[in-house]
Amino acid sequence: MPDYRRAWHPGGTYFFTVNLLQRQGDDLLTRHIELLRAAVISVRQRHPFKIHGWVVLPEHLHCVIELPPEDADYATRWRLIKMKFSKALPCTERLSTVRSRCGERGIWQRRYWEHLIRNERDYRAHMDYVHINPVKHGLVNRVADWPHSTFHRLAGEGIYPANWAGGNEDELEYGD
């Protein structure tokens, strides 16, 4: 078994990628965006965190969140978000024998990608990556055209120009 090492930093700011188990052709997250929002809101009430950036695509999501001081437990937050979203859906997915035996649903990949943000440049790069993702995946031509993103709030606050990534993607720097 691989030796997964996680960065546990109380009060840290983290970038996450969380995927559905079946990514090909599934639009479960955007089709049930209100259930996902409700799950996030519910978890934040008992386990607070600050959302800096968030984008929901049809079959995965990216976000940059900040944990409270003295708290490094992002794993509980993700477990609860996934669980609450899954429980709100009817059980129609195909379940493997292993998942069925473990009492799991066949909705989410078990693991997720986590990255501890190290400095301001790293923060800006990951925030840009979160928001450019719908364009990167060919879902829209302009970031402003994707509805399931914190881009709209941040543009309203003047953090991003309203036309950011509106056809000038070749000029932007973002990672994979």
Image: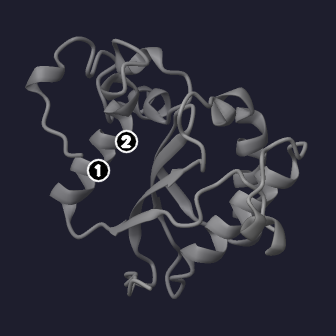
For residue 89, which numbered disc appears in the image?
none
Quadrant of residue 99 in the image? Answer: bottom right
11 over 70 or under it: above or below: above
Please state which amino acid type lies under the numbered disc 2.
Val
Residue at x-position 49% and y-position 82%: 69
Residue labelled with disc 1: 126
Residue lying at the far right in this picture: please name it.
90
**Front one among 66 and 116:** 116
Say left or right for 50 vs 127. right
Please state which amino acid type lies under the numbered disc 1.
His
Mark 1 in CB contact with mark 2 (< 8 angstroms): yes
Q: Quadrant of the N terminus?
A: bottom left
61 over 76 or under it: above or below: above
Say left or right for 59 vs 95. left
**Front one among 140 and 110:** 110
Mark 1 lies on a secondary structure that is helix
Q: Residue 27: x, y in percent?
A: 63, 29
Residue at x-position 22% and y-position 48%: 125
- Report, in whole angstroms, how far the alpha carbon at label 1 lies from the one at label 2: 6 Å
Q: Residue 100: x, y in percent?
A: 82, 66
Q: Is residue 45 visible?
A: no
Residue labelled with disc 2: 130
